[in-house]
Amino acid sequence: MAVMALHSAATGLSALSTEIDIIANNLANVNTTGFKSSRANFEDLLYQEKAQPGVENANGDQRPAGLFVGLGTRISNTQYDFTIGPPVTTGRELDMMIDGSGFFKVSVLPELGDGIGYTRAGNFFVNQDGDVVLGNSDGPRLEPGINVPADTTRVEVSADGQVFAFQSGAVVPTNIGQLQLATFVNPNGLKPIGGNLFIESAASGPPIEGNPGEGTFGRILQKFLESSNVDPVTELVSLIKTQRAFEMNSQSIQAADEAMQVIGNLRRF
């Protein structure tokens, strides 16, 4: 019946509308440091079985295929693209990029992911107490904490994450901390909370922590930032395809409406 077509097309419009929202978010964050693009994954819904495959007729022959009518689609999940974004040199001492896998750890509210957030953004600052903090709107502290002395003239970060402060009048730099990174068995299971931050979830599994350059952990590049990995051309092509699919689903609704109109007019003849 045309009513089924109406409902199926409606699920398509709803799912495609959500996909447009996801693409728009990707394009909006094309200049967001360390941003990871995401895509919508679709799945079909239940099927109405009108004829079962393999049923024998009077001659003993089997039906080679069944007759199933689908009931539409929905978005099953969003999947992140964790490929590394292009490096950009900045010249700032507290700008850091992870060249490889891993996330920086920062402190967040205790009720969010046990108080620890994870980010690929490396635009760090020093707050009024000398603590190294992430340069988003909330300024969460880097974990484990690193404090830069007030008389520091220069900061150096080695590839393995050791942080050195060159203090005024000192000949030898002071080691003021060690950066730690975290990885996850299923990073797509991380929960985004905004501000370039993710938190752990049951799907991501617990964090696997280590120092930069060890095992599978990436090394640190000082005075570099990781750009957003959004490809504007790819996103715009996806947007056009989604728009056209949206239009085709609207045409399905129009066709189903016309069929119902014909049926409704039969009593007039």
Image (cartoon, rainbow, N blue to C red):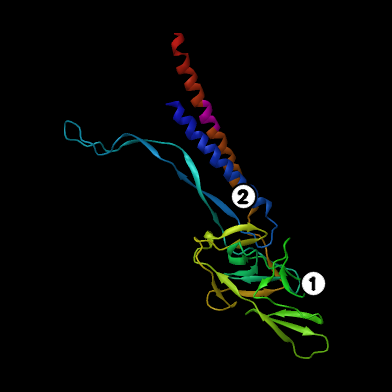
Helix, strand or loop under label 1: loop
The residue tagged 2 is 235
In the foreground, 120 or 106: 106
User: Is residue 251 shown in magenta?
Assistant: yes
The residue segment tinted magenta is: 250-254
Left or right of residue 130: residue 122: left
**For residue 82, what is the image quadrant?**
bottom right
In screen coordinates, is 171 left or right of 254?
right
Task: Decide whether residue 143 is among the magenta residues.
Answer: no
Tell me if residue 248 comes above or below residue 225 in the rendering: above
Answer with the quarter of the image where residue 84 lies: bottom right
Residue 13 image point, x, y percent: 55, 37
Residue 66, x across and y down, in percent: 31, 37
Mark 1 crowdedness (10 Å alpha carbons): few <14, some 14-19, many ≥20: few
- Image quarter where the N terminus lies is top left
2 or 1: mark nearer the eye: 1
Which residue is pictured at 47% across the width and 21% down the height?
Answer: 260
Label 2 – label 1 distance at C-alpha: 40 Å
Question: At label 2, which amino acid type do we have?
Answer: Glu
Q: Where is residue 54 in the image (x, y as percent from the top left)?
A: 24, 39
Q: Mark 1 points at which residue?
A: 128
* Whether residue 157 is situated above or below residue 137 in the rendered picture: below
Q: What element does badge 2 sit on? A: helix
Question: Which amino acid does the dot numbered 1 rest on?
Answer: Gln
